Image: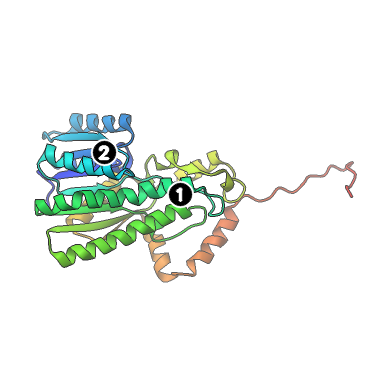
Amino acid sequence: MKSFNGRVAAITGAASGMGRALALALAREGCHLALADINREGLEHTVTLIRSSTVSPVQVTSQVLDVSDRQAVNDWAARCVAEHGAVNLVFNNAGVALSSTVEGVSYSDLEWIIGINFWGVVHGTKAFLPHLKASGNGHIINTSSVFGLFAQPGMSGYNASKFAVRGFTEALRQELDLQRCGVSATCVHPGGIRTDICRSSRIDANMTGFLIHSEQQARADFEKLFITDADQAARVILQGVRKNKRRVLIGRDAYFLDLLARCLPAAYQALVVFASKRMAPKPRRPVFEPNDEPRL
């Protein structure tokens, strides 16, 4: 798919970040849009931005959607085809983050992140795949993460969901190649992208004193690691679609961590442990005044 003009793209997570940037970039190329997000206000703002900044008129529809709800995603896919006549591109982009230890994470939090990050991708893929095949020229773009290539402590739920997206999408791409049905698939692995995911993430109290000093400080530190803006990420993704890439890495941090995992597929974990120990909060030693009597 070398051109997006006149195509129809369905995008989840379109209320902010990469989803919004993808919508704006595609609209500028004359692509019609079906947008979805659980954040109604942000979704409406994205639609307003598209209609006020796009020179050529494109059809834009929107839907407040929880991607973890299978039936809701199926209904949305059917509505997209009914409203637009066809769908050519599906960006399963919605995602959330969770920081917690394996021992301390609740089952409800694990179900929450897997439901959105992994099942949301599965629901979007399966709901739209028959429609993409019917269009004769389709592409599925699933957002994993650099942490779908490289694991880190305190992010087991996030790592699990993103590794799952990677495996699911790579298997899907191979099946589509075998079928020669006119549909392809790409797995996207962003590094630190300046989006709202940090502000909307969940950080469990068990992380404080273990890997972080405080939740507020952790969010500020994470934001510093987001070195690539969403508009740049959208450009890289769309170029990857044009080239029919199997995997798209975004940001120099993503390339570095991917290389590290390739060169040291098991040993990189020891390096992460070493670095985590250096950055982790240090236990405070008791301060004794000169006149304090020793305690027995």
Q: Is residue 59 left or right of residue 261?
A: left
Q: In the picture shown, does residue 182 fall above or below 35?
A: below
Q: Earlier in the sequence, mark 2 or mark 1?
A: 2
Residue drawn 49% across the image and 48% down it? 107
Determine whether label 2 and label 1 are within 8 Å by CB. no
Residue at 51% across, 47% down: 106
The type of residue carrying mark 2 is Ala
Q: Report helix, strand or loop for mark 1.
A: helix
Displayed quadrant of residue 67: top left
Question: From the viewer's perspective, is the residue at label 2 or at label 1 nearer?
Answer: 1
Residue 24 at least partly seen = no
The three-letter code of the residue at mark 1 reads Leu
* Helix, strand or loop for disc 2: strand
Residue position marked by numbered label 1 in the rendering:
110
The residue sitting at 60% across, 51% down in the picture is: 210
Separation (CA) of disc 2 from disc 1 = 23 Å
Residue position marked by numbered label 2 in the rendering: 36
Q: Nearer the viewer, residue 137 or 271?
A: 137
Specify whether 78 is left or right of 40: left
Where residue 59 sits: x, y (%)? 13, 35
Q: Nearer the viewer, residue 136 or 14?
A: 136
User: Where residue 160 sits: x, y (%)?
Assistant: 42, 56
| Residue 153 drawn above or below residue 7 | below
x then y, percent, for residue 83: 13, 37
Front-most of 78 and 62?
Answer: 78
